[in-house]
Every structure is written in C-alpha cells, then in structure tokens.
Image (tube, rainbow, N blue to C red):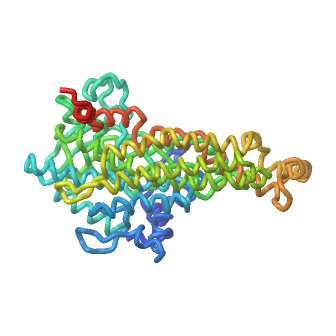
Amino acid sequence: MIKTKEDYVQSLKKQKLNVFYNGEHVEDVTTHPALIPHINAAAKTYELALLPEHEDLMTATSHLTGKKINRFTHIHQSVDDLIKKVQMLRLISHETGSCFQRCVGFDALNALYMTTYDIDEAHGTNYFQRFNEYLKMIQEENIIVAGGMTDPKGDRSKRPHEQEDPDLFTRVVEKRKDGIVVRGAKAHQTGAVNSHEILILPTQTMTKGDEDYAVAAAIPLNAPGVTLIFGRQTNEERKFEEGIDAGNKDFGVVGGEALVVFEDIFVPWERVFMCGEIGFTGILVERFATLHRQNYGGCKGGLSDIIIGATALAAQYQGTLGGSHIKDKLTEMTHLAETVYAASVACSAMGAKTKSGAYYPDPLLANCAKHNITRNIYEISRLAHDIAGGIMATLPFDKDLRSEKIGKYVRKYLAGIKGVSTETRMKVLRLIENMTGGTCLIESMHGAGSPQSQRIMYQRLGNLPGKMEMAKKLAKVE
C-alpha cells in the first residue's frame, strides 16, 4: 500500500512505464527533470493525508470495507463528502500552486460506480460487482488512476464508426472468452506518466454502429502495448535549469498531460465495466463531466489565491500596493476567485443520492462552476499582468542576475523598494508568469470540456419552458 511520498516514488520506479519525452525514451520517470515536478505535486495527495490537521478532508471511510482510505479513492456517500472534495482540492492547490492530477481518476471511479449499477439493473450484467472488486483494490493499494475520457476524434463531423481511421476513437477490436482487446488512444491525459492505471471511458454518446466504441475498462499503464507521449508545455525547458526562471520548479505548471496509445491491449473481463451498451454512454459521459466540472472552483479557486498573493507581493515590492486602483483590482480578483469557489460548493451542497447509493453534484450548477472558470481565470490573470507590470514579460535570465560581469546591473536597475532584494522581486514575478500564461490558461478553458459543452448543458438543464410558464402565470397570460 502507498502511504508516503517515498512509497509513491518507489512504486513508479518499479512499474517502468513506456514514456517518451521530446522524442526520447525515458528510462526512469522519477529522475527526469521534466517529470519530477508532476510527481512532487501528486505526492502531496499522500503527504497531506498523513497530517492530523488535514485528515478530515484528505481521508474518508470506505463504504465497502469500513477502512480509512485516501479520499481520492472514495465513492461519495453524502453531500458532506461532495463539499469536502471541493475543500480538499483548494487545500492541495495552496500547497502546490499546480495540478495534482488525481481528480480525473477520482471522478471516473465515481461515474462508473453509478453507471455500472444502472447497466446491471437494465441488462442483468455483473459490471457493478466487478467494479466494486476493482475499487477495493484501488482503495487498499492507494494507487493513482488516470481518467481516460478524451479520444483524438479525427474528423469531428463523423461518428466513431464512420472515421476513415477507426482507431481515432478507442475501441474493442476483439472479444475473447477471457477478455477483450483494445486499440486506440486517449489524448491530454493528466498525470498519466506518473499514474499506475488508466480507466478508459467512452468519450461521447454512442449510437447504433458505435457499439465497439462503448467500452469502459481498467488498464495498467505498464501493460505491454501501452505507450505514453508527454505533451509539450509552456516554459518546460526551464525545468532543466537551476535558479528561479522556472517560477514553480518544485511542482510544475499543470498536470503533465500525455497522449496514451493502446496497441492491441488485452483486458480480462474482470476489468471490463462496459462493453457495447451504447444506451448508457451518454449518462456516463454526463456524470463524469458533472463530477469533473464540480472540481474547478476548488482547484482553480486555490490557484487563484496564490496568484492574488503573488500579485500583491509584486505590487508591494514595486511600491504600488497602497494605490487605490491596485487595491480595487486585488479586490476584484478576490471576488472572481470566491465566485468560482462558491459555485463548486453550491453544486455540491445541492447534490443528491443516486440509485447506486453514491451522491452526485447538481449538474446545472456544476456546469456553471466550470463555465465561470473559462472566464474568471482569464480575468484574474489579466489583472495580475496589469498590476505586476510589463517587467514580468521581459525579465533577464537567472544567469544574468548571477553573472560576475552584468549581475550588478540587473540588481541595480531592477530593484524595487528598499529592503527587498532584486532576486526576491524576480522570484515573485516568475511565479506569476508561470501560473498565468500558456498551458495554464488553455487548461482552464478546455479541461473538463470546452465552454460550448457547458452551454449545451445549460440548454438541456436550464428548463426554459418551465421558466416561460412561470412568467406566463405571473403575467396572467393564457
């Protein structure tokens, strides 16, 4: 069982994933400079769970075994569990200033728990029992599960079975007596290069002809035929350097996303939780999306707290913190951060029990939480850039600061208020740059679904006809 950071790192050493970074094979993910920050961030989910002051948020009691488990392996049993999830995410964001990668798998586990119950009820299958046995293993071992939702999709005007290349959606290519064979890929997989398993799910609602693509299954990431290609990120080369240029060197930028390729992977039946039941793909996708969108006010609210703090420090170091317009902009940033957090708490507080016994956030409010993120985080970042100033984008290198020949000029001409070193000022500016640009903003936009996917859910769940009837009643319109 993994309990400590050391346990986690050793588990990654042992599994020997087939990872590629910048065209080269990675022999040991635990020693690669580009991957270490992501491992450190994920390790916080283990470290914080061991601290008594965070036990209530970071751990839970398994409804299957009665044992204390890491909350990231828990099935929500109450509204209180849903709210604690959001509080936990904000806490870990404060510790890392980065993505800590276990949320996607957490949400996949909960979505499959509910949906396998419903499939069994409709079709007399035994997916729910299989899944519970798998879940017990996950809880006991405390391993990290990557949630495998997003397929490459190819020509998006065509259904999965209509694609010129049928592998652009992950599919079952063979059914055997003892299991299935899976081929395809999952894109943008958060934390995959430092996870243990991937739980693949259908990426969209499947219809007649798409039966081979209606598959949910658990695959060890070190299984023969699995290849992980690490995605390029903003300022990634800085992780290879010493000094302050990385901004958040210990924990990275976002979640270390990867393209995960499956070349005819055999999956035994006990690890298969959907196979051809197209009628349940839509609800599974919707449940996963709702659970994942619930998160964003927690994690992004926490990251926003760091950005606000760093921006205030930048203003203080340059002598502008006392300005009324600076105070007003910091107040607006706080308002935006608390607004996204409030939406995540609200959808949790309005959650309800499903037939399976698991609790589920209010889907309309969860979509509202994520949609706010696609706007508010950009505005928070814009205000941070406004307050910190253009110097953030044109700072000299760390090596310039430390150079015997020119370091004196950097220290002299980039100095701020008395008593604060130029190096200190540069550290804070680099942190803001790291957290408010490139990959971070794109993930805020497209993680858990692009803005249009939330607007589609507004149309479905917003009950416009009901609102029209309320207006007609008050206006006394027949």
- Image check: 440 left or right of 270? right
> The C terminus is located in which quarter?
top left
- Image check: 387 left or right of 64? right
Q: Nearer the viewer, residue 198 or 357?
A: 357
Which residue reaches farthest left?
124
- Image check: 386 left or right of 319? left
Residue at the spot x=25%, y=46% of the render?
216
Residue 143, how many percent across, how many down? 38, 62
Residue 306, how many percent across, how many down? 60, 55
Quarter of the figure with residue 425:
bottom right
Residue 119, how many percent across, how many down? 15, 48
Viewer can see residue 116 = yes
Which residue reaches farthest front?
476
Which residue reaches farthest bottom?
52
Q: Nearer the viewer, residue 309 or 54?
A: 309
Residue at the spot x=42%, y=44% of the render?
370
The number of discs equals 0
Residue at the spot x=39%, y=46% of the render?
293
Residue 190, how many percent across, how many down? 45, 48
Viewer can see residue 259 = no
In the figure, 251 relative to 184: above or below? below
> The N terminus is located in which quarter?
bottom left
